Amino acid sequence: MSQRLVVAIGGNATHPENIRGTTEEQEELAARSARALRPLVERGGELVITHGNGPVVGKILLRQYYAREHIAPMRLDVCVAHSQGGIGHLLMQGLEDELARAEIDRQVACLITRVEVAEDDPAFHKPTKPIGPFFSAEEAQNLHRTLGWNMMEDAGRGWRYVVPSPRPKAILELGLIASLAAQGVVVIAAGGGGIPMVHRADGSYSGIPAVVDKDLTSALLGSALGADTLLILTAVSKVAIGFGKTDAKWLETVTASALHAYEKEGHFAAGSMAPKVEAALKFIEHGGKRAIIAHLDQALAALDGQTGTQVVPG
C-alpha cells in the first residue's frame, strides 16, 4: 500500500470532447471519477489529487470571445484559476458524496494552487499547448485575424488555440498541501497544472498568461511531497509503442531507462502521451518509487500492479 500518493486525472476525464458541457454532465463525470478514487481513499495514507483543465479553460476563453463587446476579458492565468475552482468544486462534491454513501469519515479540501514558472521560459516565444474546442480552418483564420489567437492543426481533427506552456519550477502552496495531507485530508490541488506565476525582482509574484502542463506539475508536486507513487489516470489502459497500429506493443512493467529510450525514439505523441511519459520519468528521476499510467476506471487495480503501465527505477 502506498503511504503517500499523488493521483493526476486527465482533463478529458472531467470534460471529454463528446459532451455539451452542461453542469449536469460535468457532475456525472465528477461522480464517475469519485467512484474510481474512493477505493484509494479507503486504503488510507496521504492522498493528493490533481486534475487537468484543457477543455474547460478553452471554453472559458470562448465565452469571453462571444461576450467581448460587453464584458472585459480575463487574462489567461485568471481563467486557469476559474477552471480550478469550478472543476475542483464538482470533484470535491462528487468525492464527498461517494465517501458519505460508503460511510467513510474523511474530509476533502480543494486548494487554489499557484505554480512558479520562469519569465524567460522559451515556451513564451513558441506557444505549443492546445486548449479548448476544435475549429475549422476558416474559423481558425478568423480567430487569428480578429483576436490574434495562435491556431494550430491538431492530430487531423481540426484547429485549436495554442498557448505558452512553461515548465513548472515550484509549487507555491506546497507547505499547505503537505500540512493538510498529513492531517488525513484528501487534497485536490494544482488543477490545470497550477496558476502560472513569475517571481518579480521585489520578491512578489505576478500571474502570467499561460497554461502549465498538468502531468509535469503533478510529477513536481509528487517529488516535492516525497510521494511513494504517482498515478496518472487517463483514457487508455496502458502506454503503447506504435499506438493505433496493428503491431502495437502495450507496456506493462518497464524500467525508466527503457521508457526513456522509447521516448527518444519518438514513440509518444506530443500533447497526449508524451507529457505523461515525461512526467513519469521525472518522478522516478527525483526519487519516486513507482509511476503508473492507467485508465481512470482501473485506478485501484493499477495501484495494485494488476494493470496499467508500471514505471520503475532502473
Image (spheres, rainbow, N blue to C red):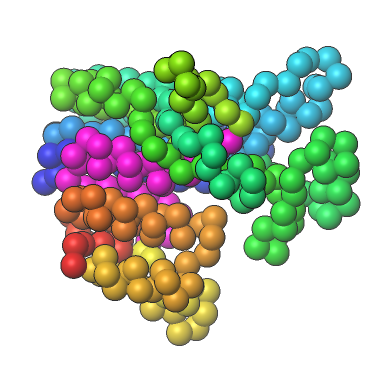
Q: Quadrant of residue 112?
A: top left
The picture places residue 31, in percent across and down from the top left corner, at 41, 34
Looking at the rendered image, the quarter that the C terminus falls into is bottom left
Q: Is residue 33 left or right of residue 309?
A: right
Viewer-proximal residue, 72 or 286?
A: 286
Tell me what residue is drawn at x 72 percent, y 58 percent.
153
Tell me what residue is drawn at x 21 percent, y 55 percent.
290
The reply to whether residue 255 is in sight is yes
The reply to whether residue 18 is in sight is no
**Magenta stretch: residue 214 in it?**
yes
Tell me what residue is drawn at x 16 percent, y 20 percent.
183
Viewer-proximal residue, 77 or 233?
A: 77
Viewer-proximal residue, 231 or 167?
A: 167
Task: Work out whether 124 lies above or below 283.
Answer: above
Task: Work out whether 12 lies above or below 87.
Answer: below
**Magenta stretch: residue 154 in it?**
no
The picture places residue 187, in percent across and down from the top left corner, at 30, 26
Viewer-proximal residue, 185 or 229?
A: 229
**Tag count in the figure?**
0
Q: Is residue 16 left or right of residue 253?
A: right
Q: Which residues are magenta?
A: 210-237
Tell me what residue is drawn at x 24 percent, y 55 percent.
284
Q: Is residue 107 left or right of residue 141?
A: left
Q: Residue furthest bottom?
A: 247
The picture places residue 271, in percent across and down from the top left corner, at 54, 55
Q: Quadrant of residue 171?
A: top left
The picture places residue 185, in percent across and down from the top left corner, at 22, 22
